[in-house]
Image: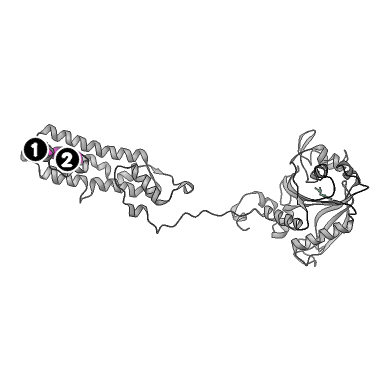
Amino acid sequence: MTTEEKVSKTLPELGVTETQGVEALFAEVRAAMEGERAELISRGAPASHHERVCKALRDRWLARKNGLLARLDEHWLKAAPRELKPAVGKCFNELRRASAALELKELIRTVPVLPESPGTRPPDAARHESLQESLPFEIPGDVAQDLTLPGYRRPLGTLHPITRVQREIEDIFLGLGFWIENGPEIESVYYNFDALNIPESHPSRDDWDTLYINAQTVLRTHTSPVQIRAMEKYGAPLHIIIPGKCYRHDNPDSTHSPMFHQIEGLAIDTDITFADLKGTLDFFAKKFFGEKVRTRFQPSFFPFTEPSGEVAISCIFCGGEGCRVCKESGWIEVMGCGMVHPVVLRNGGIDPDKYSGWAFGLGVDRFAMLKYDINDIQLFFQSDVRFLEQF
Ligand code: DAH
């Protein structure tokens, strides 16, 4: 017989006719009451259901109308045969005193609040069911399934601005028939320097510039070593771009970061000339920065290209008039480029008498800063959502 069933019967109906029986009966009810309370305390209740669950237990026992104690008062105490009244009265008072622990305030204080984890929160109905299963008393379902409560909103992420710019550049070159090649960030001194015709004495090899893992291994300082790897792997002709992370022994400031991103371009074929290089990079600059942009090629030096060039675009902020960003020159330097040095082709296993090529290297972070008018490279790597949310 459940507690409910018992409290709906009178003592004689329950076959209780003496003091001992009364005490045993009350002990049973008290054990049930304390058991339910202990059960709830051991389980705890999720924040969103906490008060409701506590109130359900409180009401079950203490509700003025129809609570178990009220029914017990009605059927056991008021209806008790005269000779049992003193014993029933005494037991009832003890039970009532013990029931103070089921007052709502008390339960709210003692029942642990379980954290609500939005990611694992099952739909309300299922949750209500599992919660109900675990409890010996009923929780009002209408409240547990309140459909007017707002749903759980999971914030959508966005692509990182560096990723966006990298993909945008990739798309332009994919459209020209280039494909994307990758290489290791931990690179040998051979691929990072030697094979690229960078002499032993070159300052970039210094350990104030390059992060060495050991004497033969570095964190690659540029994406150029993948030129050699790709030549060895595929031979000529070759039209590739190489995006990726690079590392240098630089202190972080608004324009430097020890980790940054480059995209390398490499075209090798028969009869490739400087005109191909100029045409391609001019097309690329216009696609990326806008049709109005002009390009300027100035002589420069890199050990792996001959001749080498520095590409500038007309200032995208002032249109070439001169402003703070272009330091009044009207031009912004955006990448290095050149005709692949015959030694480099040979190091990659390609015959420089048969093939020629051009190459370029650009900083993705710098392109992103120009495109979005960002003045501090560190913003890209600080994971501040107030910054990242804007993209
Ligand atoms: N590797 C050079 C750097 O990190 C950039 C570069 C310049 C790459 C000219 C090239 C090139 O392929 O032709 O500064």
- Quarter of the image that includes the C terminus: bottom right
- Nearer the camera: disc 1 or disc 2: 1
Q: Is residue 130 left or right of residue 95?
A: right
- Kind of residue indicated by mark 2: Asn
Q: Which residue is mark 1?
A: 84
Question: Main structural element of the magenta stretch: helix, strand or loop?
Answer: helix
Which residue type does callout 1 highlight?
A: Leu
Q: Hey, which quadrant is residue 258 in on the image? A: top right
Percent coordinates x, y for residue 141 in the rendering: 33, 52
Residue 375 in which image quadrant? bottom right
Q: Residue furthest top?
A: 20
Residue at the limit of the structure toward the right, as seen here: 353
Foreground: 228 or 190? 228
Task: Name the image quarter holding the N terminus.
Answer: top left
Decide if residue 163 is on the left or right side of residue 228: left
Q: Secondary structure at mark 2?
A: helix
Give the residue number, with chain letter if any, for mark 2.
Answer: 93
Extent of the magenta region: 84-95
Disc 1 CB within 8 Å of nearest ligand 1 atom: no
Q: As rendered, which of 156 and 210 lies closer to the eye?
A: 156
